[in-house]
Image (cartoon, coloured by chain):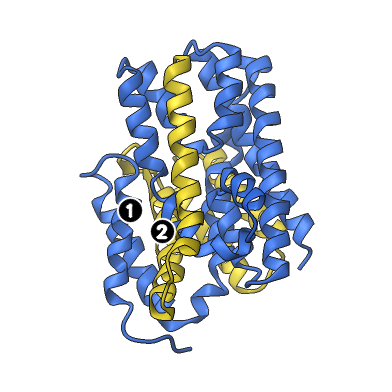
């Protein structure tokens, strides 16, 4: 990693972030389009959840991680406090790995 | 729900990943100052790991930047969704843009809209950024003494946390339809697309949004 590469990545990332924040103020957005912005964020976040639950370097991540996420998700659905959800998910996966599941 | 406590829990998990980033970048031969500047200025874990991995694999700086930016393109539609939460005045936009992180977007959206969502955005953004950088520094200093964070199952903590934060939004049936379609598309396309593209492809899930919201 070189300084020019790092600064390009940083500047590009910042401009992507800023552009999304500035656009809705620049153009008048009708309500039905705003609904798509909202659904779009949900779509991207769930896509990220799915990819980071099941995949690693383009392949299957192994069972320990998705099982941990599943246990965490059930806990969240049963209204377990957020802090515990995070600990339960990580703990389940850690224990499964300790037991030899990849 | 205690917003600051929840944000802190997320920040602690982020710091563990930050430690592993610092250790990995150092092992890949990235100088201390560049590693620290990456965490401070890029502030996007996935892109930072990818860029370092591409360099370590001999991919060259141009490929590293292109790969990182491709992975970060999802932040643009995030911005569209949280623009009014971040703030109206330009200092809020200029500083708030830097804190636009997956977990921060999910965290503030889970608090609805208005003043509480705004506070949640800034609290979680500043906490996550601070812990990410502190973790990176620790990882650089401790280096190879750091165990692989997968031992602690941290990789399961993030999807579970995001999912927990998304549950309120998923009470709407159109959001459930779109989210499910998006998740399926993203996972199914992962073996065939460059990192970052599968998540963007998830936007195709908007095709099943239907006409109006219902509960």
Q: Residue beneath label 1, please?
A: B200
Q: Is residue A43 visible?
A: yes
Question: Between residues B131 and B160, which one lies in front from this camera angle?
Answer: B131
Q: Position of residue B93 (x, y in %)?
A: 60, 51
Which chain is home to disc 2? Answer: A
Q: Residues within 10 Å of mark 1 (few under 14, many from 20)?
A: many
Q: Are marks 1 and 2 on the same chain?
A: no
Secondary structure type for disc 1: helix
Question: Between residues B109 and A98, which one lies in front from this camera angle?
Answer: B109
The extreme left residue here reads B192
Residue A49 to residue B146: above or below = below
Secondary structure type for disc 2: helix
Q: Which mark is residue A44?
A: 2
* Mark 1–mark 2 CB contact (< 8 Å): yes
What colour do you see for chain A? yellow
Q: Position of residue A16 (x, y in %)?
A: 44, 45
Q: Which mark is residue B34?
A: none
What colour do you see for chain B? blue
Question: Between residues A102 and A5, which one lies in front from this camera angle?
Answer: A5
């Amino acid at each position: 990693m070189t300084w020019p590469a790092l600064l390009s990545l940083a500047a590009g990332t910042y401009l992507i972030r800023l552009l999304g924040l500035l656009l809705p103020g620049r153009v008048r957005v009708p309500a039905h389009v705003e609904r798509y912005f909202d659904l779009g964020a949900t779509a991207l976040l769930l896509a990220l959840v799915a990819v980071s639950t099941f995949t690693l370097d383009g392949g299957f991540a192994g069972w320990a991680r998705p099982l941990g996420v599943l246990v965490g998700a059930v806990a969240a659905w049963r209204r377990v406090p957020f802090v515990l959800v995070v600990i339960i998910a990580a703990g389940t996966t850690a224990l499964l790995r300790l037991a030899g599941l990849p | 729900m205690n917003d600051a406590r929840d944000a802190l829990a997320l920040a602690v998990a982020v710091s563990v990943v930050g430690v592993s980033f610092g250790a990995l970048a150092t092992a890949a031969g990235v100088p201390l100052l560049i590693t620290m500047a990456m965490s401070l200025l890029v502030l996007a874990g996935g892109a930072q790991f990818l860029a370092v991995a591409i360099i370590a694999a001999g991919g060259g700086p141009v490929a590293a930047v292109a790969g990182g930016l491709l992975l970060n393109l999802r932040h643009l539609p995030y911005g569209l969704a949280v623009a009014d939460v971040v703030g109206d005045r330009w200092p809020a936009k200029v500083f708030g843009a830097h804190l636009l992180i997956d977990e921060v977007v999910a965290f503030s959206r889970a608090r609805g809209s208005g003043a509480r969502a705004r506070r949640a955005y800034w609290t979680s953004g500043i906490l996550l950024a601070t812990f990410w950088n502190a973790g990176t520094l620790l990882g650089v200093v401790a280096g190879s003494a750091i165990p692989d964070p997968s031992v602690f199952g941290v990789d399961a903590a993030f999807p579970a946390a995001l999912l927990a934060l998304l549950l309120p939004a998923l009470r709407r049936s159109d959001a459930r339809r779109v989210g499910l379609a998006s998740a399926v598309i993203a996972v199914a396309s992962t073996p065939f697309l460059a990192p970052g593209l599968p998540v963007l492809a998830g936007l195709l899930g908007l095709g099943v949004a239907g006409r109006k919201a219902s509960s």
